[in-house]
Image (cartoon, rainbow, N blue to C red):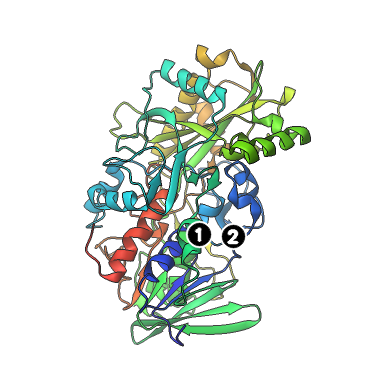
Amino acid sequence: MSRHPSYVIIGGGTTGCILAAKLSEDPAAQVVLLEEGPSDRNPWIRFPGTYYKTCQGPLLKRYPWDSAAELARAPGDTMIQASVLGGGSSINGMVYARGNPGDYDDWARSGATGWGYADVLPYYRRSEDNSDFCNEAHGMGGPMGISFNNHVHPLTRKWLQACQQAGFAFNPDFNSGNPGGCGYYQIAARNGRRTSSTSAYLNPALHRSNLQVITGAKVLRIVIEQGRAVGVQYSRGSQVLTVRAEREVIVSAGAINSPKLLMLSGIGDANELSQSGIKVQADVPGVGKNLQDHLEMSQVYQLKGVQSYDRYKKAHWKAWAALQYLVARSGPIASNLIEGGLFACGSQTDKMPDLQYFFLVGAGIEEGTDSVPGGTGCTLNFEHVRPRSRGSVSLRSADPSQLPRIAPNYMSDPYDLERLVEGYLIGQDIMAQPAFSRYVAAQHYPGRTFIDRNELGEYLKRNARAALHPVGTCRMGTDPLSVVDPQLRVMGIENLRVADASIMPNIVSGNTNAACTMIGERASDIIRGLPAL
């Protein structure tokens, strides 16, 4: 590695790992990837069925957020983000859902030229090694192993029948360009093992002499000289180090830390930066604005006459699950436990689905109800995936060690609460359909059936949760509040780009990790000056 690498990438999450691998394909380019968290050696990362361990443990960083006034509960909520190589792709539930084509066309209409659905689809296809599809929407031979679950619980099939009884058509492929209806989720896994951006992209590139990955590196600021990004200052242990970049600095630290880092480096709203005692390098008022996230809620049911995955909490069943996996790559360890889903419209006037459902054959640990009477349960989780509310990320001070101030402003637009109410009622109706209701002993959480919409709305204000899909805080576009242009270049600063979930003008109506993979693929071509696919 030369003294001054060509590219310094800040953040080894989903997009950062992809960029490090793709940019280092050029032997003339020297690439350094800085990641604050550890490597992805934690064994629970590998298996789909153990993601609940990775999404609760030491691979996370918690950011308290200011509760919106509309949320009728005490402060103390946190925004949780991955802190490990691979980022969210190493700890998430692996659901592979790109969203609606209209999401990306909205991006293009808002000023993100070249990021419409027809533009991004080739990059989705290039990233995929799909076990089941190869057509105009899907690819084979790419780095990302995508497949249906190796194991599907019989009760998932019953739930999908209940969805159809409730009036929703079966959809064999949510990523075909028409996501509406119910069906089986494809997941980011291959042969019963998680596919993260680390395992798919970064690890195969680690043998290259022109690629250096530094973990445990907390970035303090971007070094800017005469309007140009020239390097990165970071701490590792007790040392404070600086690495300079000959070509570009690329920020891929996520929707919380990317705007924080820009602001610490003097890029943001000039008045706010001056109040924090930070020298203004570029007055970019949109930095940290436009924060979006999905809100979610769950219903947990006690089951009768059927065994759910809850049985595998017992030691002898855990041993049986391990044997199933070792012999046949089957059983609950080979499943992400989120096997069936639904995309629905919360209003007859909606042109695109704005509600997403996840069915789990087990009691939901996120609700604090990981056991139900009788020991067997199931969970129906849903999200409002096209929110109108917007929040922000800002600095508390110029001290890099201080966590940023996060104001998500959930439900600040009344429309979002209306859709959550409708989504809850739709889920309640599905669970009451004959195909599934015969297996239900009782509703365990929240323990009642809602009829009154106002009462349900108040309940959701107290209990809806962040889905932890933050995006949008370094918005891509061409208007005065855009932070990066369609080439991902930061406004007002040369040789500096942002590439991660923060660039999304609007949140996608599905799980955001697939879109972050696409952003990594597309950004790598843009940075290298390659023609669009």
> Cβ–Cβ below 8 Å for labels 1 and 2?
yes
Using the rendered image of the protein, determine whether residue 446 is visible from the camera's viewpoint: no
Helix, strand or loop at mark 1: helix
Residue 375 in which image quadrant: top right
Q: Mark 1 points at which residue?
A: 198
Residue 138 in which image quadrant: top left
The image position of residue 362, as x and y in percent, is 63, 31
Q: How crowded is mark 1: few (under 14 residues within 10 Å), some or many (20 or more)?
A: many
The image position of residue 444, as x and y in percent, is 65, 25
Identity, as a three-letter code, of the amino acid under mark 2: Asp
Which numbered tag is attached to residue 84? none
Helix, strand or loop at mark 2: loop
Identity, as a three-letter code, of the amino acid under mark 1: Thr
Q: Does label 1 or label 2 sit earlier along the sequence?
A: 2
Residue 300 in which image quadrant: top right
Nearer to us in this view, 23 or 464: 23
Quadrant containing the C terminus is bottom left
* Residue at 50% in and 59% down: 198
The image position of residue 47, as x and y in percent, is 59, 46
In the image, is residue 463 above or below residue 405?
Answer: above
* Residue at 46% in and 53% down: 470
Nearer to us in this view, 480 or 102: 102
User: Is 221 left or right of 120, judged from the image as shown?
Assistant: right
The image position of residue 429, as x and y in percent, is 48, 19
Q: Residue furthest front?
A: 327
Q: Name the residue under label 2.
A: 40
Q: How crowded is mark 2: few (under 14 residues within 10 Å), some or many (20 or more)?
A: many
Nearer to us in this view, 422 or 369: 369
The residues bearing labels 1 and 2 have C-alpha atoms spaced at a distance of 8 Å
